[in-house]
Image (tube, rainbow, N blue to C red):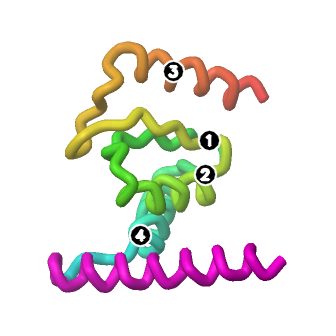
Amino acid sequence: MIANKWIVHSSLILLVLQEEKVASAFPGAIPNADLVSRVVATLEKYGYGETTMLTTSLCCDEVNRVLDHDFTKAYGSHHFSMGGLAGFPFGGVTSFGGTLDRRCEVTLS
């Protein structure tokens, strides 16, 4: 139990340090949680929500893992990560096919 608390505490410290580093390098950058909230709120205005499958093309670098996990929390199993670089998916036709396969699962369930 103590080890788990230490891991959670260490993870929070690393997240705070990471956000501070991003803020110093990119003034005006918003935290991941704010970005996710804004995306969800914006998409809801257009009718997207519970049955929406969000597909992202984030770089697979570990820096983006937190954002990827935050989107997964917001959309649950309705989030598909294609991977990418600068927003361009690098999975090609296979990634888009995977997105369509998952879309059918969401629609049918």
Where 85 sits versus 63, above or below? above
Residue under circle 4? Answer: 32
Q: Residue at the location (72% across, 81% down)?
A: 5
* 8 sits left or right of 89 in the view: right
Distance from the alpha carbon under mark 1 to that under mark 3: 12 Å
- Find residue 56 and report its horizontal and vertical position in percent: 40, 42
> Gap in Å between the C-alphas at discs 4 and 2?
15 Å
Residue 105: which disc?
none
Can you identify the residue that label 3 sits on? 98
Q: Amino acid at mark 1?
A: His
Instruction: Name the residue at 50% across, 43% down.
Output: 54
Q: Earlier in the sequence, mark 4 or mark 2?
A: 4
Q: Position of residue 40 (x, y in %)?
A: 50, 61
Give the class, few, some or many, for how many residues have Cα within 10 Å of label 2's Cα (few <14, many ≥20): some
Q: Judge depth for marks 3 and 2 and give the one in front.
A: 3
Q: Which residue is mark 1?
A: 78
